Image: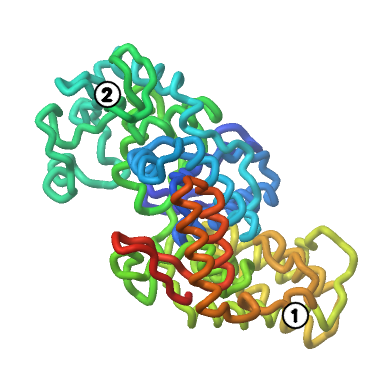
């Protein structure tokens, strides 16, 4: 039986779906104002494998991954670029989908955008107000009073007093308590807004996911996932809103993937160790990055470094080399009676243990090399396919260059930067982003600052 580590229960639990044979799963997606980074890559790949394994296990899966397309950072970036929010978010949704496709991530069944669900958010806020769990503050914002929700803190495992003492909370005189969080923000000059019973404004971040998930999956569903950084306050607030409005359990199983570190340090723009997916793919094959992510258990910290990516490339090369030497049988199905397949299944049923599943692939590759068995080669290819790996012809992977195939000259780099500056000045941000992407593909990273644009080789 499949076991899942439930962050709410703090233990592995047998997975029992609400409706036999069906799984409804929601994962918090991206806030689209910039390129996706390595942390986003991990969320994309981890939950892609989760939904793949659920489907391979015979479940009918409804997978929802949202897009946040209204947010303080989005508004600020659009204002800086002198472009509309739609222009900004549509562009970066396109880039996000390109990155996901490159990593072999299958599209979710639904990819709702927050701005399309404002009416549903207003319904939820109205129900919370009716239940005594929303109040309009003197500044016009509508807030959730956390001390009136008895279960607040059950996901993070902290009491309200601990949270107030230990977490950074906004000090806002208009709030009844510093931990109270906003459901509806009053309109500000120059910002987008929608009409509401509490005046023109826009939704708070947390209410978005409660509205989208309940509309597409129902008030009570099976799995909710996301990065560990979302456990508090975002997911804690989702529970409070959803259960406070609907008076029933929100989610049965909470899954959180671990943080990404870079050379054993926290990833941060201020430390200069912040890498976008596109920067990484300028140096490494996308399948190498996917394989690197899956070699670590999803709940463990993931330490990114060139050395680890190089090791992942060598390891993936071993698997492809085994397939190159022996032509697999023509079959699209795994033989689950075979010993390696049973070990693989046991690993994946143990909280999606992809490191152990990958170890099975290497043992199988050894057997393929030893016995030159087409049936074992087929097992290797098909089991790897359940992880989104080894889908290409071996020769294609083995012949492809790991990087961009040549070093761009300084003159060429500076010429493209000048073209990008000119494009930004004439507000052609699509062209500016295209030029930045061209440079990224050549391994050139741009950093925009007060003194202009500087570049470095990735």
Q: Residue at x 35, y 66 (%)?
A: 267
Residue 240 image offset from top left, x and y in percent: 32, 31
Mark closest to the chain's N terminus, 1 or 2: 2
Who's the residue at 39% across and 20% down the image?
Answer: 194
List the residue tagged with mark 1: 399
Within 10 Å of disc 2 (Cα), the crowding (few <14, some 14-19, many 20+) is many
Specify whether residue 442 is in view. Answer: yes
Q: Nearer the viewer, residue 259 or 55?
A: 259
Tell me residue 197's x, y (percent). 32, 11
- Is 196 above or below relative to 176? above
- Looking at the picture, does residue 193 appear above or below residue 75? above
Can you give x and y, in whole percent of width and height, for residue 320 in the image? 73, 77
Residue 264 x/y as whole percent: 35, 75
Name the image quarter holding residue 369.
bottom right
Q: Is residue 87 above or below residue 261?
A: above
The residues bearing labels 1 and 2 have C-alpha atoms spaced at a distance of 57 Å
Compare residues 199 and 188 and report the one nearer the observer.
Answer: 188
Which residue occupies the foreground of this view, 188 or 230? 188
Question: Disc 1 on helix, strand or loop?
Answer: helix
- Residue at the spot 42% in from the left edge and 30% down from the top edge: 210
Residue 261 seen in this snapshot: no
Disc 1 crowd, CA 10 A, few/some/many (<14, 14-19, 20+): few
Q: Nearer the viewer, residue 245 or 23?
A: 245
Question: Residue under circle 2?
Answer: 186
């Amino acid at each position: 039986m499949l076991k899942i580590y439930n962050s709410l229960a703090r233990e592995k639990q047998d997975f029992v779906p609400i409706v036999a044979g069906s799984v409804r799963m929601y994962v918090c997606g991206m806030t689209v104002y910039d390129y996706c980074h390595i942390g986003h890559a991990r969320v994309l790949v981890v939950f892609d494998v989760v939904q793949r394994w659920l489907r391979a296990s015979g479940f009918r899966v409804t997978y929802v991954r949202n897009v946040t397309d209204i947010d303080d950072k989005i508004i600020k970036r659009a204002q800086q670029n002198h472009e509309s929010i739609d222009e900004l978010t549509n562009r970066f949704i396109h880039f996000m989908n390109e990155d996901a496709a490159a990593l072999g991530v299958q599209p979710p069944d639904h990819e709702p955008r927050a701005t399309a669900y404002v009416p549903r958010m207003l319904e939820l806020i109205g129900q919370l107000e009716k239940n005594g769990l929303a109040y309009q503050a003197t500044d016009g914002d509508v807030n959730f009073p956390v001390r009136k929700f008895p279960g607040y803190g059950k996901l993070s495992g902290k009491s309200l007093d601990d949270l107030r003492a230990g977490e950074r909370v906004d000090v806002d005189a208009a709030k009844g308590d510093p931990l109270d969080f906003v459901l509806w923000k009053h309109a500000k000059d120059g910002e987008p807004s929608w009409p509401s019973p509490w005046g023109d404004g826009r939704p708070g971040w947390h209410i978005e996911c409660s509205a989208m998930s309940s509309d597409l999956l129902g008030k009570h569903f099976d799995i909710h996932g996301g990065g560990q950084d979302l456990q508090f306050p975002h997911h804690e607030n989702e529970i409070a809103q959803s259960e406070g409005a609907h008076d029933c359990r929100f989610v049965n199983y909470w899954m959180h993937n671990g943080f990404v570190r870079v050379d054993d340090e926290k990833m941060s723009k201020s430390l200069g160790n912040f890498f976008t997916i596109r920067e990484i793919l300028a140096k490494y094959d996308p399948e190498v990055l996917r394989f690197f992510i899956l070699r670590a258990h999803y709940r463990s910290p993931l330490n990114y470094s060139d050395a680890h990516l190089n090791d992942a490339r060598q390891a993936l090369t071993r698997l492809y080399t085994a397939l190159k030497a022996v032509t697999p049988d023509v079959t699209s199905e795994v033989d689950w009676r075979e010993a390696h397949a049973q070990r693989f299944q046991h690993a994946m049923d143990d909280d999606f243990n992809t490191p152990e599943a990958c170890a099975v692939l290497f043992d199988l590759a050894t057997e393929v090399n030893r016995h030159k068995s087409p049936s074992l080669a087929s097992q290797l290819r098909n089991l790897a396919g359940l992880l989104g790996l080894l889908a290409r012809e071996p020769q294609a992977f083995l012949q492809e260059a790991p990087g961009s195939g040549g070093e761009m000259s300084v003159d060429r780099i500076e010429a493209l930067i000048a073209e990008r500056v000119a494009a930004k000045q004439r507000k052609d941000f699509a062209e500016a982003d295209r030029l930045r992407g061209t440079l990224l593909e050549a391994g050139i990273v741009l950093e925009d600052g007060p003194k202009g644009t500087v570049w470095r080789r990735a």
